[in-house]
Image (tube, grey):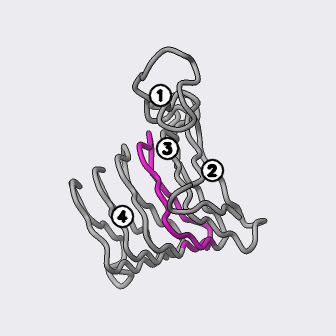
Amino acid sequence: HVNGSNTAPVVFTSRSDDTSGGDTFHDGVQPTPAGAWRAVFVNSAASDVVLNSLQIRYAGNTYGAGNPSGFANSLDISGASVTATNLVVRDSDGNAINVDGGGALTATGGLLANSRSNDLVLNGGTATLSGFAIVSAPTGINVAKNSVVNVTASAFDGLTTGITTANTASV
């Protein structure tokens, strides 16, 4: 379980992110690149996964920021069921969230923003989102075959494409 709160979220970020934890390198405020670290993984061995007020920032690359051979998912849910409130995944060098292998994400309130590719990818997974802002990425939600998405009371902005789907019955 991750048990942050609205006033004190749990933040997983790059050590160069001076906005959380202060100026680690004592070099003044410096920009933090997307992809400075890889990801948070939740797999089928996990059960009863709850993420309350979690922020994931500047992740999404296996080999380091901007490396085209290493684009990755910042939050990778594979075969697990995850419930989240106030989930923020932003500034991803790859996709913000990937749900696959029969995994499921049920999330209320949050932000998916500034991903290089997709804010949310479903590839054999399910997602139910309510009260989300899905912004500033080429694609907001990418739904592959054998996947289902349900989005309510949410806003899409600054995207080239809001939702792409391989099977129209899923939207």
- Mark 2 / mark 3, whichever is N-terminal: 2
Query: Residue 104 lies in what quarter of the image?
Result: bottom right
Q: Residue furthest right?
A: 45
Q: Secondary structure at mark 3?
A: strand
Q: CA distance from mark 1 to mark 2?
A: 19 Å
Q: Which residue is mark 3?
A: 57
Q: Amino acid at mark 3?
A: Arg
Q: CA distance from mark 4 to mark 3?
A: 19 Å
Give the percent coordinates (x, y) of residue 91: 41, 43
Give the percent coordinates (x, y) of residue 168: 32, 80
Q: Nearer the viewer, residue 29 or 108?
A: 29
Q: Secondary structure at mark 4?
A: strand
Residue 40 is marked as 2
Query: Is residue 80 a member of the stretch shown in magenta?
Result: no
Q: Which residues are magenta?
A: 82-105
Q: Amino acid at mark 4?
A: Ile
Residue 141 is marked as 4
- Mark 4 / mark 3, whichever is N-terminal: 3
Q: CA distance from mark 2 to mark 4?
A: 19 Å
Q: CA distance from mark 3 to mark 1?
A: 17 Å
Q: Residue furthest bottom?
A: 169
Give the percent coordinates (x, y) of residue 148: 45, 78
Q: Amino acid at mark 2?
A: Val
Q: Amino acid at mark 1?
A: Asn
Q: Nearer the viewer, mark 4 or mark 3?
A: 3
Residue 67 is marked as 1
Residue at screen point 48% across, 29% down: 65
Give the percent coordinates (x, y) of residue 164: 30, 66
Mark 4 packing: few (<14 Cα in 10 Å), some, or many (20+)?
many
Q: Is residue 83 left or right of residue 129?
A: right
